[in-house]
Amino acid sequence: MLLLDASGRTLMGHQERRSLGALGWRVDSAAASRLLPDSAAAAEMTARILIEILHVAHPADLSCHLEVLSAP
């Protein structure tokens, strides 16, 4: 299973998904998720994923959608 963008391009292949799993993320066919303690931890983890897993030269090179879910 691969995660694809709206144009059908691969965003995360099998290796990238395994790498996220090793970092404690839950990855399914539609999304990757992980509960983090605060926004600073979320920002740090996001930058780490962009640079180490997706090999983005600089996070500012991307347009991202972040959805924050509130706790019940």
Image (spheres, grey):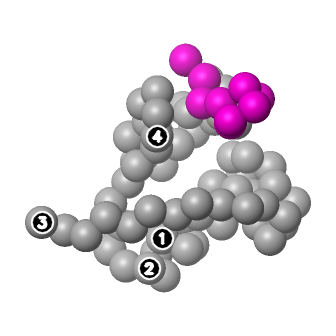
Amino acid at pointer 1:
Ala
Precedes in sequence: disc 4 or disc 3:
4
Amino acid at pointer 4:
Ala
Q: Which residue is mark 2?
A: 39
Q: Which residues are magenta?
A: 1-9
Label 4 vs label 2: CA separation? Answer: 19 Å
Regarding residue 2, the answer to whether it shows in the image is yes
Residue located 46% across and 27% down the image:
29
Indicate the quadrant where residue 37 lies: bottom left
- Helix, strand or loop: magenta stretch: loop
Precedes in sequence: disc 1 or disc 4:
4
Tell me the element at label 2. Answer: helix
Q: Which residue is mark 3?
A: 72
Label 1 vs label 3: CA separation? Answer: 19 Å
| Residue 39 position within the rendered picture, expressed as x and y whole percent measured from the top left | 44, 79
Label 1 vs label 4: CA separation? Answer: 16 Å
Label 2 vs label 3: CA separation? Answer: 18 Å
Depth check, mark 2 against mark 3: the one in front is 3
Taking 72 as reference, is 57 left or right?
right
Give the tally of numbered discs: 4
Q: Which residue is mark 1?
A: 42
Q: Which residue is mark 4?
A: 31
Tell me the element at label 4. Answer: loop
Label 1 vs label 2: CA separation? Answer: 5 Å
Residue 3 covered by magenta stretch: yes
Regarding residue 48, the answer to whether it shows in the image is no
